[in-house]
């Protein structure tokens, strides 16, 4: 009774003390029930997803991946607050086929849209539709390039010139009571380029010229304009992060930053070297991923669909050809695959190439080696390539810059990607690497059989001149 009197004032009448105790006890249990209910609600809250997919950007064109000459503060922020993949690869280095592959979780030749500008067939399942069925609000904002509009997206915004103009509107107009998936597709840094895209343009004498491009005024000017468009896109990432914070959904939103293919320069876009198929890949999810992490896990863009569906608690459709890398988010030392596969189909020019890439080797098989490896038509028309053509015609273009002009080409290529990161030294004819060549051949043959791949009997012909880039 002494403790009881300490809790209640002695001035209270004795008959009120049991009622007050009952009232206080009831409030306590109500509080516990409410707390548990709120905790369960928080724990069961579905994550939100945003994929930021940029158009024609190299994997290493940001401070995060080693290029400190380019202004990318917000891309770098994503990495500083999340997980950066060192070995993420695309299934093709071609715009629409790459996007169709990502959104279906299937290899390009299995989507029915393996060539540039082919519309994705309406019967192809896309993973945003699976999220939509599970209660997600789904949005595409920016570049579409997937064919006819799809009902699996509740809202579709088209925007130019950067393709990022509607990202803020998409976030501000979403229904607040639903989890969301947003496909934010930039047009940057796709050609053509214009000066003064940003307030403080990059200077030509302050760019990094990769070793497969000639270091001259034309190349540097071209790269500086390319840098500007990446920086413009980067500024919109900052706006997205700001809105997520203001809406109090920042911590439970998984952001994926990536590209659809390599930069629109010679020996990059459409090619199966790392300069074409390797993609920047950064995940930021404050509530579930620790900051400043990196992983060497090998992943493919077909793995995005099963990963997001697993995280959303959605059953994985049988159509998916990728594997989930959720385990890597929990442990950045994990591995989920031994190799990735990629393909090069028609993109302005006739071609058919297939590649297998693991952590040691890149193997490429070319079905039409009689053709030179021309870059896309817009890159052919660039000041970089036109200057290269002039020097080549005069016989002054050195070997390391002449790759695109070679015909006929070797039908097979093998590169030691560890010791030859730019894939400049073909080892396919080197007797010391014949065992490795044989193993990579076998892996490719198995993948071809498993995915029902084949060489086209009537391949699509060139639609542009390989030297001028003009339409035929």
Image (spheres, helix red, strand yellow):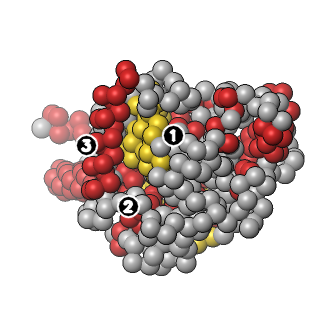
Closer to the N terminus: mark 3 or mark 2? Answer: 3
Q: Which residue is mark 2?
A: 454
For mark 2, does the 10 Å Cα neighbourhood hold few (<14), some (14 to 19), or many (20 or more) residues?
Answer: few
Mark 2 and mark 1 lie on one chain; the one further toward the N terminus is 1
Q: Is residue 288 left or right of residue 119?
A: left
Picture quarter containing residue 227? top right
Image point 81% across, 45% down: which residue? Answer: 386
Which of the two discs, 3 and 1, sits closer to the camera?
A: 1
For the residue pair 77 and 36, the one nearer the viewer reads as 77
Nearer the observer, 119 or 141: 119
Label placed on residue 410: 1
Q: Residue 299 got which mark?
A: none
| Depicted 463 relative to depicted 191: above or below | below
Secondary structure found at label 2: loop
Q: How many marks?
A: 3
Which quarter of the rendering shows the C terminus?
bottom right
Q: Of helix, strand and loop, which one carries label 1?
A: loop
The image position of residue 105, as x and y in percent, is 38, 59
Give the x, y percent position of residue 457. Answer: 44, 67
Q: Is residue 433 left or right of residue 153?
A: left
Q: CA distance from mark 3 to mark 1?
A: 92 Å
Q: Earlier in the sequence, mark 3 or mark 1?
A: 3
78 lies above or below 92: above
Name the residue beneath numbered marker 3. 8
Q: Nearer the viewer, residue 164 or 458?
A: 458
């Amino acid at each position: 009774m002494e403790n009881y009197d300490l809790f209640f004032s002695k001035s209270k009448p004795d008959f009120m003390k049991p009622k007050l105790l009952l009232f206080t006890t009831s409030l306590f249990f109500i509080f516990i029930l409410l707390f548990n209910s709120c905790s369960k609600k928080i724990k069961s809250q579905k994550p939100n997803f945003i994929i930021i997919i940029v158009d024609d950007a190299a994997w290493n064109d940001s401070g995060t991946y080693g290029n400190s000459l380019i202004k990318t503060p917000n891309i770098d922020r994503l990495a500083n607050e999340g997980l950066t993949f060192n070995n993420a690869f695309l299934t093709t280095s071609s715009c629409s086929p790459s996007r169709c592959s990502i959104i279906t979780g299937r290899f390009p030749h299995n989507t029915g849209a393996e060539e540039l500008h082919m519309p994705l067939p309406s019967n192809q399942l896309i993973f945003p539709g699976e999220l939509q069925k599970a209660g997600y609000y789904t949005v595409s904002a920016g570049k579409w390039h997937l064919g006819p509009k799809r009902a699996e997206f509740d809202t579709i915004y088209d925007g130019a010139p950067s393709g990022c103009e509607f990202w803020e509107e998409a976030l501000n107009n979403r229904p607040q009571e639903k989890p969301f998936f947003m496909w934010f597709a930039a047009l940057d840094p796709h050609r053509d380029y214009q000066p003064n895209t940003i307030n403080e343009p990059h200077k030509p004498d302050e760019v990094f010229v990769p070793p497969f491009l000639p270091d001259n005024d034309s190349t540097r000017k071209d790269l500086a304009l390319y840098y500007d468009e990446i920086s413009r896109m980067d500024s919109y990432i900052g706006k997205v992060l700001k809105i997520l914070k203001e809406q109090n959904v920042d911590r439970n939103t998984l952001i994926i930053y990536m590209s659809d293919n390599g930069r629109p320069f010679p020996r990059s876009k459409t090619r199966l070297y790392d300069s074409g198929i390797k993609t920047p890949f950064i995940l930021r999810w404050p509530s579930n991923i620790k900051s400043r992490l990196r992983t060497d896990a090998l992943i493919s863009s077909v793995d995005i669909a099963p990963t997001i569906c697993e995280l959303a608690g959605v059953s994985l459709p049988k159509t998916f050809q990728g594997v989930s890398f959720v385990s890597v988010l929990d442990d950045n030392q994990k591995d989920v695959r031994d190799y990735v596969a990629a393909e090069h189909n028609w993109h302005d020019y006739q071609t058919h190439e297939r590649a297998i890439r693991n952590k040691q080797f890149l193997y490429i098989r070319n079905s039409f080696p009689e053709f030179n490896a021309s870059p896309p038509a817009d890159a052919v028309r660039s000041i970089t390539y036109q200057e290269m053509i002039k020097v080549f015609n005069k016989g002054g273009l050195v070997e390391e810059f002449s790759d695109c002009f070679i015909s006929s080409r070797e039908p097979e290529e093998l590169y030691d990607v560890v010791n030859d990161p730019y894939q400049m030294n073909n080892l396919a004819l080197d007797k010391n690497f014949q065992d490795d060549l044989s193993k990579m051949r076998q892996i490719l043959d198995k993948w071809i059989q498993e995915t029902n791949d084949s060489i086209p009997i009537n391949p699509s012909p060139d639609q542009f001149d390989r030297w001028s880039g003009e339409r035929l």
